[in-house]
Amino acid sequence: MAMPDHVDVTTHSFTDCHALARALADRIAERLRAGIAARGQALLAVSGGSTPVHFFRQLSRAELDWSKVHVTLVDERWVPESHERSNARMVKADLLQHAASSAHFVPLYTDAPTPEAGVAAVRARIAALPFPFDAVILGMGTDGHTASFFPGGDRLAEALDLAGTALLLPMRAAGAGEPRITFTLPALLDTQGLFLHIEGEPKRQLLADARLGLGAGKDYPIRSVLIQTRVPVAVYWCP
């Protein structure tokens, strides 16, 4: 059988972002329950930023055995949890509450001075997790980045290489602010479910351009997620 020339991308649109948060939380909770039922534990990777806050708060109250769930991040800024831009800080404040407080959180940051110095320790920590992911939830920036796949990133080509074997890589880019650490694209595609959560009309148009390869969209890093053939992508969008 011939392989498809592009992945299936389905879009779930909501007029209200609270409705999106409820629907996405229900979908992810189903994935986690299925993982627990199949192998006794589940693995979830989430994104940072402001977009997922409502979703996190909904998911935190989902009825499932959170003690059997491992949660990690798609990527992280190389800053301690005390820093206001720490993704781990936001996950702990908004997701690992209520029922989800018993989940096992695995951060991507160490106290090494740089992500290059700390990546080996993080790789060892992550390698112990129960792969594959049951769900990976990506976001997208207005520059077309996802995870820490930034335009102009110093290791962008390596991170997007589907033949690559690294789980995680350091990443530095002008648009990234702080140095970062990120799961690679092939690592993120080792999942039972791949979700892209975006909000706002400009991002919907940016995503359409990336998917079709129109104009600047052909060079957006998110395009690599949309044209891979390994895992279908479920887009959740609201204005």
Image (cartoon, rainbow, N blue to C red):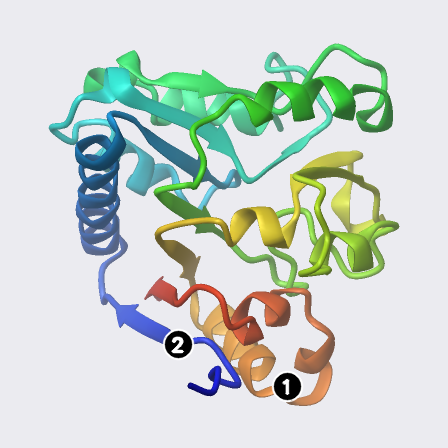
Residue ranking furthest to the front = 1
Q: Badge 2: few (under 14), some or many (20 or more) residues near its Cα, within 10 Å?
A: some
Where, quadrant-wise, is the C terminus in this rendering? bottom left
Q: Badge 1: few (under 14), some or many (20 or more) residues near its Cα, within 10 Å?
A: some
Residue for point 39% across, 36% down: 44
Helix, strand or loop status at disc 1: loop
Give the residue pinned by disc 2. Answer: 8
Q: Is residue 17 depicted above or below 214 in this figure?
A: above
Closer to the chain start, of discs 1 and 2, is 2
Residue ranking furthest to the left = 63
* Closer to the camera in the image, 24 or 198: 24
* Closer to the camera in the image, 122 or 172: 122
Helix, strand or loop status at disc 2: loop
Say the numbered circle drawn on residue 173.
none
**Percent from the top left, x then y, of residue 96?**
34, 20
Give the residue pinned by disc 1. Answer: 213
**Percent from the top left, x then y, of residue 148?**
68, 47
Q: Is residue 105 depicted above or below 62 in this figure?
A: above
Q: Is residue 97 depicted above or below 22 in this figure?
A: above
